[in-house]
């Protein structure tokens, strides 16, 4: 029976997430589900998974509670209650994963998980690079010509969300690592993952990584700024990427600009509690079907508009407060640490959060592939 202990189920859930998060949404959900079950089991038994003691941690958990409550309230206004409930369950699972990680004290196991995660992301990136030059797609069509790599997750923006979150984390371990051999491995992984990210041609993730690495340079070492500058020069040097960057706002009838103009109207129709979780597709196309030829969008390609549309301006305020508390708490924690694994974890987490918030200006990483965050 020891094999089925709460701690072992929790560790198994973490392991499944570390292996599958870079590869499969369904696999990541399985890991999150195992973690959530362990959390529920512990809470039902009267155990405290994590009791925040410092003020910063308490603020984050209070903000999570408020945001979760607003999600529940918004569900009563949803025109697609089934989708809203499914989405709420998913977000609740991710919050459970966050709580479980916050209270997990096995540093040795965490080191292994980080190593596994980085190795899987690097392997996925290698496959993506091969895919770009060869057209290989082992999951679907055999060999096809793709101008943007999708890896095994099926969409370039999904892959970019994974890689964008991973780049600042890998860079953090590269920066703090003292062992020469491991430093070389992190360096090679950083180059491979950054190269694959470039080949997704996802501008939001590019902007997110640039902002993340620049912010990390500001916090720790101004000399680091040369890294995002080099990445920016490389992006501009490639004709395809340069064309995408320059043409971002030239086409006034592009889908994103249409969404950005029309979604605020939806928000103002229900400004307080929104239309309910995961309600955008049904609500938007029922109102603006005639002006948007593409029918498959689940979000308005802006995380902040998406949050406000789903949960209202009250929900957006709670979301912003949550990430303000999270980011400011991580920064304060970082300045109390010495070099080593804890510093690498916190520094990488700061970069991942900045990437996430920046990426969200032009896409919806919270609706899409946001598990790495």
Image (cartoon, rainbow, N blue to C red):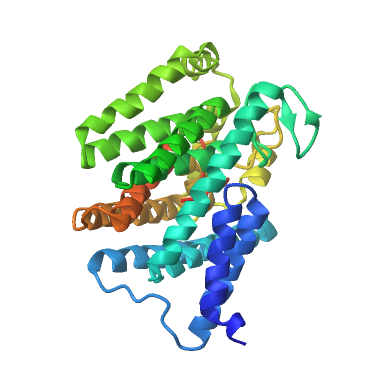
Residue 30 image point, x, y percent: 64, 62
Please count the marks in the image.
Answer: 0
- Residue 271 visible in image: yes
Q: Residue at x 38, y 75 (%)?
A: 50
Q: Residue at x 30, y 66 (%)?
A: 57
- Residue 158 visible in image: no
Report which quarter residue 276 is drawn in.
bottom right
| Viewer-side residue, 173 vs 263 | 173
Residue 55 falls left or right of residue 114 = left
Residue 327 falls left or right of residue 206 = left
For residue 31, above or below residue 238: below
Residue 238 image point, x, y percent: 50, 14
| Viewer-side residue, 184 vs 146 | 184
**Where's the N terminus, which quadrant?**
bottom right
Q: Residue pushed farthest front?
A: 181
Q: Residue at x 52, y 61 (%)?
A: 94
For residue 24, above or below residue 58: above
Residue 329 image point, x, y percent: 27, 57
Residue 144 image point, x, y percent: 76, 25
Residue 162 falls left or right of residue 344 = right
Q: Residue at x 52, y 31 (%)?
A: 197
Report which quarter residue 91 is drawn in.
bottom right
């Amino acid at each position: 029976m020891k094999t089925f202990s709460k701690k072992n189920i929790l560790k198994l859930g973490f392991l499944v997430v570390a292996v599958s998060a870079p590869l499969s949404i369904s696999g990541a959900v399985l890991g999150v589900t195992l973690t959530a079950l362990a959390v529920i089991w512990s809470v039902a038994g009267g155990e405290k998974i994590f009791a925040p003691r410092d003020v910063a941690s308490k603020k984050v958990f209070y903000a999570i509670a408020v945001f979760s409550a607003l999600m529940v309230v918004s569900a009563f206004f949803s025109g697609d209650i089934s989708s809203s409930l499914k989405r709420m369950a998913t977000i609740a699972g991710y919050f459970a994963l966050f709580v479980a990680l916050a209270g997990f004290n096995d540093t040795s196991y965490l080191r292994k998980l980080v190593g596994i995660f980085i190795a899987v992301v690097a392997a996925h990136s290698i496959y993506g690079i091969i895919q770009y030059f060869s057209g290989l797609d082992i999951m679907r069509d055999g060999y096809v010509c793709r101008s943007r790599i999708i890896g095994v997750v099926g969409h370039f923006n999904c892959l970019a969300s994974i890689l964008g979150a991973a780049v600042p984390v890998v860079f953090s371990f590269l920066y703090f690592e003292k062992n020469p051999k491991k430093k070389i491995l992190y360096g090679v992984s950083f180059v491979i993952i950054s190269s694959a990210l470039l080949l997704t041609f996802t501008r939001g993730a590019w902007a997110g990584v640039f902002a993340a690495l620049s912010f990390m340079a500001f916090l720790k070492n101004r000399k680091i700024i040369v890294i995002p500058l080099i990445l920016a020069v490389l992006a501009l040097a490639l004709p395809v990427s340069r064309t995408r960057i320059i043409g971002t706002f030239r086409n006034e009838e592009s889908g994103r600009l249409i969404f950005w103009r029309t979604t605020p109207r939806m928000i103002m129709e229900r400004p307080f509690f929104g239309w309910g979780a995961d309600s955008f597709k049904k609500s938007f196309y029922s109102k603006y079907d005639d002006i948007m030829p593409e029918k498959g969008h689940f979000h308005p390609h802006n995380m902040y508009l998406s949050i406000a549309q789903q949960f209202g301006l009250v929900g957006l305020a709670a979301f912003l407060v949550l990430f303000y508390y999270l980011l400011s708490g991580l920064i304060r924690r970082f300045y109390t640490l010495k070099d080593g694994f804890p510093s690498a974890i916190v520094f990488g987490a700061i970069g991942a959060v900045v990437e996430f918030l920046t990426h969200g200006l032009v896409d919806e990483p919270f609706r899409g592939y946001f598990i790495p965050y």
